Image (tube, helix red, strand yellow):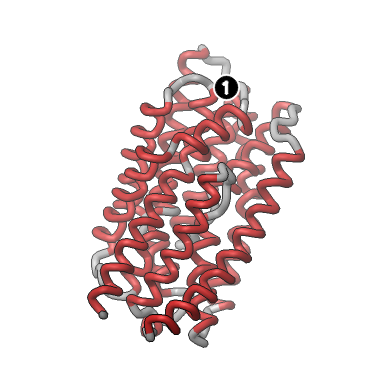
Amino acid sequence: METFYIVGMIIAGLFFGWTIGSHYTGAVMGTAYGAKIFDVRTATLIMAICALLGATLQSHEVIKTVGAGIIPIEYLTPFRAMIMMLNAALVTAVNTWLKLPISTAQLACFSIVGVGLAIDAPIAWGKTMLPLAITWVGTPLVGCLLGFIFTKTVGAVKKAEKIKRAVLILACCYASFTLGANNSGLAVSVLYGSGTVKSLLLAGFIGGVVVAIGALTWGRPLLEKVGLHIVQLEINSAIGAQFGQATTAYIAALLGYPTSMNQAIVGAIGGAGLARGVKYIQLKVIKEIVINWFVSLIVSGLTAYFLYKIFSWLLGAK
């Protein structure tokens, strides 16, 4: 049965990576798509390539934090890891289907916490979860500040529209690279933590591949919702918001603390709006997103807890 659970863990992790790729198309490519620079196919293809590079080269700190920093690795059996990743993948997939932006970083971490509580594992509340919580709270605030600064800077530069469109493409590529560095490691973290994949480079590459496949195969729904219905920015604000988002999340990835690309872009768009004296996001939309973030976080922890209890009882596994 151990082999069965190892295979199940791998499939669940890859499934989660696929849902991450499909979920974040709007967050990293929504501005360019909304500005009619890319069609869906081009946007998702460029995102896939850049995310693969970011995952392979710079997701290693995130993999270590999530895979071995929340509960001790001796508690991370293949069966438990399978439940953690399956739970995070299912919650992400449901929200993508509903076209609701969420934080996959929070889902992954609280899926691990939920199973950890179910097995009475020591949770690194102070060492890992507290810095993560501070990162999550700070993400939209830092994103707002950087979005404001970048938008002011870009707006002060008088360049042709064509050049600024090229800069926006660069910003979206940067955001996609950051997605790979910041979020793809979530899907393979337990593979590394459980010792199934021993190389951080290989783990990052595997995460990048499945994130890329997710973007290419199911990236349209949230790309269209964010690009056409949530985010509609003029070129200076779009550049400032995308650079603000990417820089915020990239710093978090370098520190090893995965954060939400969605929270970063919402904060950065708010900062861009302040810089231009425009209200870009309706309060109703913000309320919907924030409520869903908190609900998803709680649901993720609870469902992971009960999924483990149920399947552990049914299968007699630990």
Q: Nearer the viewer, residue 123 or 81?
A: 81
At x 58% / y 35%, what residue is drawn?
Answer: 241
The location of residue 129, given as percent across then percent down, is 56, 71
In the rendered structure, the answer to whether residue 171 lies left or right of residue 41 reads: right
| Label 1 Cα neighbours within 10 Å, binned few <14 / some 14-19 / many ≥20 | many
At x 47% / y 49%, what residue is drawn?
Answer: 250
At x 44% / y 53%, what residue is drawn?
Answer: 182
In the picture, residue 298 is in which quadrant?
bottom right
In the rendered structure, the answer to whether residue 231 lies left or right of residue 92 reads: right
Task: Quadrant for the N terminus, please.
Answer: bottom left
> Secondary structure under badge 1?
helix
The location of residue 124, given as percent across then percent down, is 53, 79
Which residue is tagged 1? 235
Q: Nearer the viewer, residue 310 or 123?
A: 310
In the picture, residue 76 is in which quadrant?
bottom left
The answer to whether residue 113 is visible is no
The answer to whether residue 128 is visible is yes
At x 68% / y 38%, what residue is drawn?
Answer: 270
Task: Quadrant for the C terminus, please.
Answer: bottom left
The location of residue 186, given as percent across then percent down, is 42, 60
In the picture, residue 106 is in which quadrant?
bottom right
